[in-house]
Image (cartoon, grey):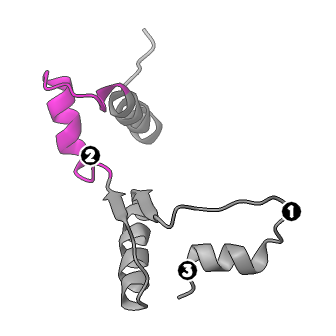
Amino acid sequence: MRSPRRARRCRIPSRRKTTDDGKLFITGYSEGGYVAMATVKAMQAAGETVTASAPSSGPYAIEGLGDLIFFGQVDIGSTVFAPLITTSYQNAYHNVYNQT
């Protein structure tokens, strides 16, 4: 696997004089978290140095997360996931928002 820095240097013609400090940080979220982990593993196997990585994942037990949020265990992600869960249920089952 070619280092992103080496690839950039080979593929992008330098019009400006830019440099990097040699540190490489890799991150990803959800499916990107897996990609970040696989990338770090492949780069390290190829002898590249990765300064740090921060792969993250989403809430995969979404029904359990919904129960926690709606029964009062609110956290920082609640403002995103509560509306997501509610509108998803409405789109799937058409019974969350009833017209009366």
Are the two marked residues, 2 and 1, in contact with CB atoms closer than 8 angstroms? Answer: no
Residue range highlighted in magenta: 58-79
What amino acid is found at the position of numbered circle 3 in the picture? Ser
Q: Residue at x 53, y 88 (%)?
A: 1
Query: Residue 77 lies in what quarter of the image?
Result: top left
Q: Which numbered disc flags the more N-terminal residue, 2 or 3?
A: 3
Residue drawn at (20%, 28%) of the image: 69
Q: Nearer the viewer, residue 99 or 88?
A: 88
Query: Which label sits in the foreground, 2 or 1?
Result: 1
Of tags 2 and 3, the one toward the viewer is 3
The residue to which callout 1 is attached is: 15
Check disc 3 and report the residue beneath it.
3
- Gap in angstroms between the C-alphas marked 2 and 3: 36 Å
Quick one: label 1, few (<14), some, or many (20+) residues within 10 Å?
A: few
- Residue type, label 1: Arg
- Mark 2 belongs to which amino acid? Ile
- From the viewer's side, name the closer residue of 54 and 75: 54
Q: Secondary structure at mark 1?
A: loop
